[in-house]
Image (tube, rainbow, N blue to C red):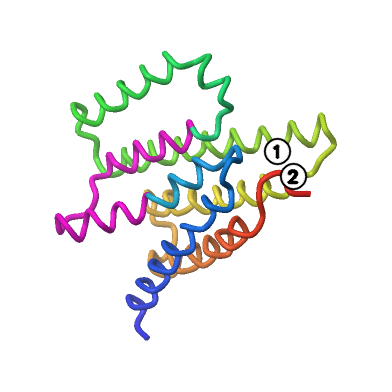
């Protein structure tokens, strides 16, 4: 089996596997987070099959923006609805008019992923500090987010062999996908 075949099989298996966590997390706080994650790759794959081009990176910026929003509590989102709408419009305007380079888009994606990581890490720390509960779900979610950040960072800087790094992080993300397919948020 060649490296490209292995990457392709891992990619398709990962897409299939990540369709399960939103079902498992249904009616939980991170349902929309997992739903957006589950839909990003199939949508980009479908787009590629129809248009024969890669999905524009703007799609990933908006998907990651909605991933960030999905980590906030509902009441927090409602309190800051105008700020959220304005930042979404600003992001759309920047995408249309700014003409970002590939590296600049990767930096924005890393920043959004880092904000998601900071949000979930804060929830983990607050739960541990105030409730004296060690939330394994949030800990695993944070490790998963670290793999995403390192993937984007590798795209930006190229600190590792792209194929090998992709294979290793995708295998790790498949393991995380298994975990989120089995364990629900707030399970004891």
Q: Residue furthest left?
A: 51
Q: Which residue is mark 2?
A: 135
Badge 1 is on which residue? 124
Q: Closer to the camera, 109 or 43?
A: 43
Query: Is residue 57 part of the magenta span, yes or no?
Result: yes
45 over 153 or under it: above or below: below
What residue is rendered at 68% in x and 48% in y?
Answer: 137
| Quadrant of the rendering where the N terminus is positioned | bottom left
**Above-or-below relation of 86 to 10:** above
Identify the residue at image location x=51%, y=67%: 171
The residue that appears at 22% across and 53% down in the rendered structure is 47
The mark that comes first in sequence, 2 or 1, is: 1
Disc on res. 173: none
Side (left or right) of 135 relative to 113:
right
Span colored in magenta: 40-69
Q: Is 56 colored magenta in this rendering?
A: yes
Of all residues shown, which one is farthest toward the bottom? Answer: 1
Estimate how packed mark 1 is, as few (under 14), some (14 to 19) or many (20 or more) residues with alpha carbons within 10 Å.
many
Q: Residue 84's spot in the image, x, y percent?
A: 42, 20
Query: In the image, is residue 182 above or below residue 97?
Result: below
Q: Quadrant of residue 120?
A: top right
């Amino acid at each position: 089996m060649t490296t490209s075949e292995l990457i392709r099989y891992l990619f398709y298996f990962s897409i299939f596997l990540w369709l399960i966590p939103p079902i498992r997390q249904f009616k939980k706080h991170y349902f929309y987070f997992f739903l957006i994650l589950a839909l990003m790759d199939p949508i980009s794959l479908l787009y590629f099959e129809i248009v024969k081009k890669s999905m524009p990176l703007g799609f990933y910026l908006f998907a990651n923006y909605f991933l960030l929003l999905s980590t906030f509590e509902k009441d927090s989102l409602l309190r800051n609805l105008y700020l959220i709408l304005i930042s979404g419009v600003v992001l759309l305007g920047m995408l249309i008019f700014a003409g970002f380079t590939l590296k600049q888009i990767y930096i924005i994606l890393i920043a959004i992923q880092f904000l998601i990581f900071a949000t979930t890490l804060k929830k983990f720390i607050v739960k541990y500090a105030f409730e004296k509960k060690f939330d394994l779900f949030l800990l695993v979610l944070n490790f998963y987010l670290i793999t995403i950040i390192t993937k984007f960072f590798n795209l930006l800087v190229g600190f590792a062999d792209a194929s090998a790094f992709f294979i290793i992080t995708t295998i790790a993300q498949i393991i995380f996908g298994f975990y989120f397919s089995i364990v629900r948020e707030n399970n004891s």
